[in-house]
Image (cartoon, grey):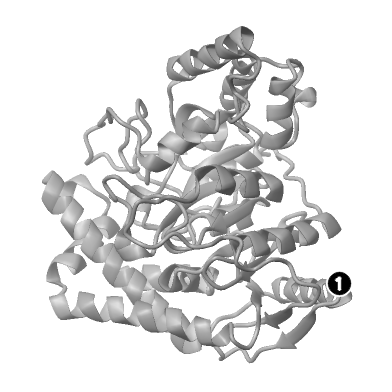
Amino acid sequence: MARDDIPHDATALAAEIRTGRLSAVEALEEALAAADREADLGAISLLAPELGRHRAALLDAMRAEDPESLAGAPFAGVPFLVKDLGGPFAGIPVDAGSAALEVRRKDADSYHAARTREAGFVPFGRTTVPEFGLSLACEPAIGPRARNPLDPERTTGGSSGGAAAAVAAGIVPVAHATDGGGSIRVPAACCGLVGLKPSRGAVPGGPAFANHLFGIAAGLVVARSVRDVAAVLSAVSGRARGPFPDPDLDRDRLASSLKVGVLTGAEGFSIAPERAAAVADAARHFEAAGHLVEELSPDRLSAEIAASGRVFDRVISANLACLFRDLGIRNEEVEPLSAAVAARGRAMSATDLYDAGQESVMVSHALWRLFDEVDVLLTPMLSEAPPKLGFLPTDHDDVDGHWRGMAAFAPYASLANAAGTPALTVPFGEDEAGLPLPVQLVGPIGSDRLLLRLGEALAAERPFIPVRRRRA
């Protein structure tokens, strides 16, 4: 099948495979060919073609023997790339973007990985991440450096930047991603994609809970369509087996009239005029659809944004210190920023870490109180267009400066992580340079499907299709 005939999103591609117009093996070979064509983007840090071919051939054989055998696998045969953090996926080596980790091949899937396979996806490689996921850019010292397909001189965002680049370039229609401080939503926003950080507890993190991070992290995908995100969420969520109760993702059905709280700015941060205008335009969309819109003061969540940053700092630092201890990682084996973050974690007191947990609770409580007043929050996702490569270097030990740079780029990103709420980013039009204008929707825990329905309406009004640009 010619490249132009490959469907736009995973739902459409799965339908082509299900009806026999395309086999799983053919879909995988096209993805491998696309990975080769787009190698200069640095989206993929490792390919495992034989692993993918074995899985694709197995699915084709199952369908040939019994056409109904894969009826419960909505994405049967769809090629899939795995993030180099937050798995594991059996057979995909993990090094977290760092030369310090010996490549380790896990014998068993995580619960999330197992459900991804049960949905029919065909993993065949691993996407690029910044070392240990410590950045909203994706340029690990060991390489490759991920480039934005919309403009290869610009960042993909991070830490799921390789995943976003692969999807935006059309290598795969969806890719595995994780979010501990905006790491699904920021790359999706940079590359013109859709990204949902699910509600705390919605997607399983076991059995090892290696990416638990005190509950601030969650995994799902970056995708080219809202319907793909919704379908993947349905396929992998529920029955998480701890440590949190399973949220009811249908608790907020789309009412005839919702109250949307709008934040076009953020106190202490500069939001580019076209980014604020996109939020205002999205607010007018909701108003025209019959929803009530209330403009909120830019300082409304200032304290919670600051607290969320402290939670992220302490949890990530403590986590990295433990990783260094458990794996015997030495400072000289890692990038300077990673060494400094781990040192911060080692120096942290138990009371400092306890305070972070308590602040996370209070951020969550503050948002619950706000959701007594409004049903959904609408905010900017990014403060500016994706910057040029190198805007967030990691060859230094200024941890606070690095965190400030990330907060300035995505002021509202870590709020949902600390609070545990779902948060969705969708592109809503484009700027004069043809780059996406993403907005973010945040709702109470369990409102994931409500956010997806609202996001689908935004995407329908101003669709954005990522178009790959070649380097000059």
Q: Position of residue 249 (x, y in %)?
A: 57, 60
Query: Does 101 appear above or below 269?
Result: above
Which residue sits at x=53%, y=69%? 409
Residue 427 in which image quadrant: bottom right
Is 205 in front, or is 385?
205
Q: Position of residue 357 (x, y in %)?
A: 29, 76
Identity, as a three-letter code, of the amino acid under mark 1: Ala
Query: Is residue 99 visible in this depiction of the protein?
Result: yes
Q: Secondary structure at mark 1?
A: loop
Q: Position of residue 217 (x, y in %)?
A: 40, 59
Is 15 in front, or is 3?
15
Residue at numbered disc 1: 289
Which residue sits at x=38%, y=64%? 216
Is 27 in front, or is 235?
235
Query: Does 74 appear above or below 86?
Result: above
**Quarter of the picture holding the C terminus:** top right
Q: Is residue 42 left or right of residue 95?
A: right
Q: Is residue 48 left or right of residue 345?
A: right
In this rendering, the count of numbered labels is: 1
Q: Is residue 208 left or right of residue 185?
A: left
Q: Residues within 10 Å of mark 1 (few under 14, many from 20)?
A: few
Residue 443 in which image quadrant: bottom right
